[in-house]
């Protein structure tokens, strides 16, 4: 589990492909390796990956292996040597919880389509891809002032347009300096994870409506509708 509060910016120094995926070596990572162990989870641009090797020497580096599924679902398959990546270690029980519950399981990618300076802040607009049977729309989980995770960073949604499949966020100056998102160019892909609380609520409600508990909920909804109609004098 993660918080979406980026700890450090690392640099991809090596990419080695194989039939099943690829191995990334991420350098300049010493600040997050002081308590590292083989097998630990580190979110890289929002994707939870397993440390397969590491060293605290020469500025610090660690390696992770990405399966083809991860490469297809995230932007990591498009990264190249020299690119910055957002890094966050798994959440510790002893720290304040300042972001939101982030699984670091990427739902899809979105495209940066607009950058608008707003004083010292920066407004960014993203567009989601067309939904498919295997990857339905994520828009039901995006609401203004709700949470979204972009490249691993927990951010607040400023607006959502269901028709255009777009959503926006604003980065204050401090955030621009701490994460890579503010330096991405128009057309760049970013990793998106929607708030998992919304997913659980939706599944619970649908299960109640379709299962045995649905009759009670259905009766309650019908009573509410009848009461509203009665107040308006509609039979």
Image (cartoon, rainbow, N blue to C red):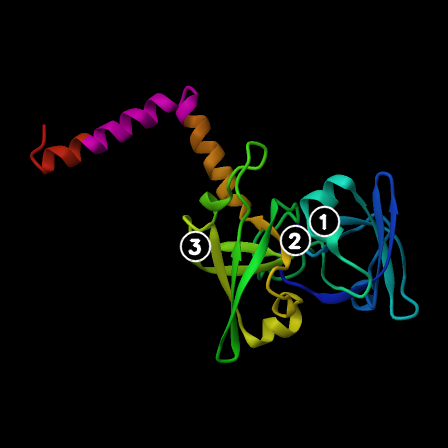
**Element assignment for label 2:** loop
- Indicate which disc, 1 or 2, sits on the residue closer to the N terminus: 2
> Are dots 1 and 2 in contact, CB under 8 Å?
yes
From mark 3 to mark 2, how far is it between C-alphas?
24 Å
Name the mark nearer the viewer: 3 or 1. 3
135 vs 41: above or below: above
Quarter-of-image position of residue 183:
bottom right
- Indicate which disc, 3 or 2, sits on the residue closer to the N terminus: 2
Give the residue drawn at x 83%, y 57%: 36
103 vs 206: above or below: below
- Magenta highlight: main SS: helix
227 relative position to 136: left or right = left
Is-magenta flag for residue 79?
Answer: no
| In-front residue for pair 192/214 | 192
- Indicate which disc, 3 or 1, sits on the residue closer to the N terminus: 1
Name the mark nearer the viewer: 3 or 2. 3
Magenta span: 209-225
Give the residue drawn at x 63%, y 62%: 5
| In-front residue for pair 138/55 | 138
Q: Position of residue 150 (x, y in %)?
A: 60, 57
Which residue in the rendered view is the most extreme toward the top? 212
Q: Disc 1 designates what residue?
A: 48
**Element assignment for label 3:** strand
Q: Disc 3 designates what residue?
A: 160
């Amino acid at each position: 589990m993660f918080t979406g509060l980026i700890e450090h910016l690392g640099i991809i120094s090596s990419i080695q492909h194989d039939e099943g995926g690829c191995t990334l070596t991420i350098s300049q990572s010493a600040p997050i390796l002081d308590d590292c162990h083989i097998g630990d989870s580190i979110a890289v641009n929002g994707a939870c990956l397993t440390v397969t090797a590491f060293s605290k020497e020469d500025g610090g580096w660690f390696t992770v292996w990405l399966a083809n599924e991860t490469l297809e679902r995230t932007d990591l398959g498009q990264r190249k040597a020299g690119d910055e990546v957002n890094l966050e270690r798994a959440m510790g029980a002893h720290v304040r919880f300042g972001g939101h519950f982030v699984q670091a399981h990427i739902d899809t990618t979105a495209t940066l389509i607009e950058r608008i300076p707003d004083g010292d802040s920066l407004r960014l607009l993203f567009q989601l891809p067309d939904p498919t049977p295997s990857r339905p729309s994520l828009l039901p989980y995006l609401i203004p002032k709700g949470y979204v995770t972009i490249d691993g960073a927990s951010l607040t949604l400023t607006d959502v347009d269901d028709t255009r499949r777009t959503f926006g966020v604003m980065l204050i100056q401090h955030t621009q300096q701490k994460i890579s998102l503010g330096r991405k160019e128009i057309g760049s892909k970013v990793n998106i994870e929607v708030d998992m609380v919304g997913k659980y609520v939706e599944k619970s409600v649908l299960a109640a409506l379709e299962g045995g508990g649905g009759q009670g909920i259905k009766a309650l909804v019908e009573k509410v509708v009848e009461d509203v109609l009665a107040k308006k004098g509609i039979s």
